[in-house]
Image: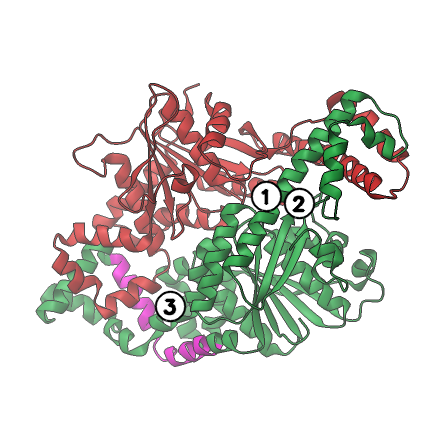
Amino acid sequence: MHAKKVIVCVGSGGVGKTTMSAAIALKAAEVGKSVCVLTIDPAKRLANALGLTALGNVESRIAAERLEQAGIVNPQGQLWAMMLDTKRTWDDLVSRYAPSPAQARRILDNHYYQQISSALAGSQEFMAMEKLYELHESGKYDLLVLDTPPTRHALDFLDAPGKMMGFMDEGVLKLFLTPSRLAGRLGLGFLTSSSAWMFKALERLTGFEVLRDISDFISSFSGMHAGFRDRAQAVEAFLRAGGSTFALVTSPNPLTVDEAIYFHRKLAEYRMPFSGFIVNRVHADALGEPGATEAWQRMRVDPAQIFQALGVTGSAPLASRVTESFDRFQALAEMDAAQIERLRQTCAGPHLWRVVPAFDVDVHDLSDLARVNRYLFSEDRVGPEAGVP
Amino acid sequence: MPSLFDKRLLIFTGKGGAGKSTVAAATAVAAARCGKRVLIIEIGEQERIPSIFAAARAGYGGARVYAGAAPGGQPIWSMCLTARETLHEFAVRSVKFELLYEAIFENRVVRYFTAAAPGLDELTIMGKIESLHREAPDPRAPRFDLMVFDAPATGHGLALFKVPLMAMTMTRMGPLHAKVERMWRLLADPSRTAFNIVTLPEEMSVNESIDLYKAMAEMGLPPGKLVVNGVYPDFFGADRGELLRLHEQARPAGGLAATIARAALDRAVSSVTRHDMQQSLIGTLAGTLPMERITLPFVFRPQIGPEEIEALADHLEPL
């Protein structure tokens, strides 16, 4: 964390990416960094995790007193959080690169633009990258932590800058420029036969109106392509550069482990810098000590021993219920350990591994995040790694 | 009240990790027991449904993934749609000839355009689902009675359902307009479609479900059931008072036996704490969302397979 400028937390839905992102940011603030955590999740999860009610498209600072209330004595750095507003990021970008306010207005008023700039997949991911880069360039932060949408959209996420670059490629766009003339040609058959076929097919597929909207939109971008393309290239280069790293968050659920393996492979294919795995919601093995399993086997056939060992007297039905519940928890712990082992075997390499247990209550405020950090950043690594080979 | 199984399209969405695929699979099993011909639809690169039924990949063409355990029930089909394959099929149908498809859709210009046009993926997927509701994928077979759609999580799910609505305003006329209008009419029709929300009894999942419900209501999407998944049993019932008292009284652990006994007692108290927390969140849901609720028990098993799905389906059969 110390050497990095950007940490991107990726993983399946529901594994606790937002929580981990927020916890990492909290730790960075604790040790003196100026850090901002950024979420692009449409469901306002980070707001929940940070106990904030409103996060606009601007960073808001979490007051130092709140960090202290969460048990962080004398925090050295600053914790900021932001929830991405995709549409507003688009609007800002358009306004920045438009040669004139009138041209900016033309784009902002365009039908097609209004559709793609709202919460559609792909556009969101690209804007997250854009905002990340913008925050990085502002120089206000030592570290940025990015929370991402679930892995089923991983490809969208990693492809986003490339896709946009393709879209903004001037050579391709030329064909779409001057839509009104193109529209006339379609009717008049001025195009060569193969192009005419192509556009006729497009027209049949999309309806004519939409084609005009898109052409209008693209033509109103004229003069801005270079700016956009350079920007998209800069964002991509920045992500691949040494200052950023990806952390893969997963739970020990077999299906999410499958997805983590898939995602790990994708990150490698895309040559993204990768630092390690955070396995969250793990049921810790309570019988990790040598001889503990055998001792429990002896105890569970005579459940009254549980109470005796603790110097209390309880009923026999309760003792057997306790035994049954412990067996269930241990079964969960064994399943989790097996899944973590499978993940380790499949994704071998010099990765960092962190295991965060399943807590009894939801993680939803700063003190809970601080509790998570005892496992994410423990010095001795006894607690978090217990029960994991 | 008519059964949910008499509809044509049951959509399952909710927070990521809430168990949408599991619930979709169990719903399909419950409906198949009632004699319905069911098709499960999922989207994306990673197929989940067939592995839940211990079956081979179904792919874009679809395949039978489960024969069913109950006599007289129907087998279950599954299909995994990717935007690429859907667009291909759609385009080939529209331009009639594969060669033309290649000329048009493998064209550099068009490929760039379609790859970067946000919303197009969603539109073709929704279009495929709409056409599956009207006709069988195989012309020799009868069409499916019920489609169970394992939809993407909240945000991306909403984006997917919004696309036909947006496309309607964008096309205004022409052949695509008629098609997107049909998509939207299917989605918004309470007699054919129901949007079900899957949630865990956890705070963030519950909050997200409440937001999701509001967003769906605003869009005019017909609500179905609220499925609360992974509910802990009330394991200690009337013994909980005694358990908590003993947990207080127990002396600090020393030695292996006491350490283990302490861990066993801690885990027992954990399960009581979790149960209480879950019940209070279920109370919040009941007080906030005007949706009929179904609770599914936490599955203490390493892997969800056909046996677990059959057990969960028991809870869903009265749908």
Can residue B222 be seen? Answer: no
Label whose residue precedes the other's in the sequence (3 or 1): 3
Residue A182 numbered tag: none
Q: Is residue A215 magenta?
A: yes
The residue pinned by badge 2 equals: A283
Stretch of the chain drawn in magenta: A209-234
Disc 2 crowd rating (10 Å Cα; few below 14, some 14-19, many 20+) is many
The residue pinned by badge 3 equals: A163
Seen in the picture, residue B200 relative to A144 is either above or below; the reply is above
Could you tell me the amino acid type at mark 1?
Answer: Met
Q: In the image shown, does B212 or B145 lie closer to the viewer?
A: B145
Q: Main SS type for the magenta part?
A: helix
Q: Contact, CB < 8 Å: mark 1 with mark 2?
A: yes
Please state the chain letter of the residue tagged with numbered disc 1 in the rendered image: A
Q: Position of residue B277 (x, y in %)?
A: 71, 36
Q: Position of residue A73 (x, y in %)?
A: 85, 63
Q: Position of residue A336 (x, y in %)?
A: 60, 46
Q: In which quarter of the image is the C terminus of chain A?
A: bottom right
Q: Which chain is red?
A: B
Residue A55: quadrant of the picture: bottom right
**Marker count (numbered):** 3
Q: Contact, CB < 8 Å: mark 3 with mark 1?
A: no
Front label number (1 vs 2): 1
Identify the residue shown where x is 69% and y is 29%: A324
Q: Which chain is green?
A: A
The residue pinned by badge 1 equals: A335
In this rendering, position of residue B208 left or right of residue A98:
right
Q: Quadrant of the N terminus of chain A?
A: bottom right
Identify the residue shown where x is 42% and y is 61%: A155
Label whose residue precedes the other's in the sequence (1 or 2): 2
Label whose residue precedes the other's in the sequence (3 or 2): 3
Q: Contact, CB < 8 Å: mark 3 with mark 2?
A: no
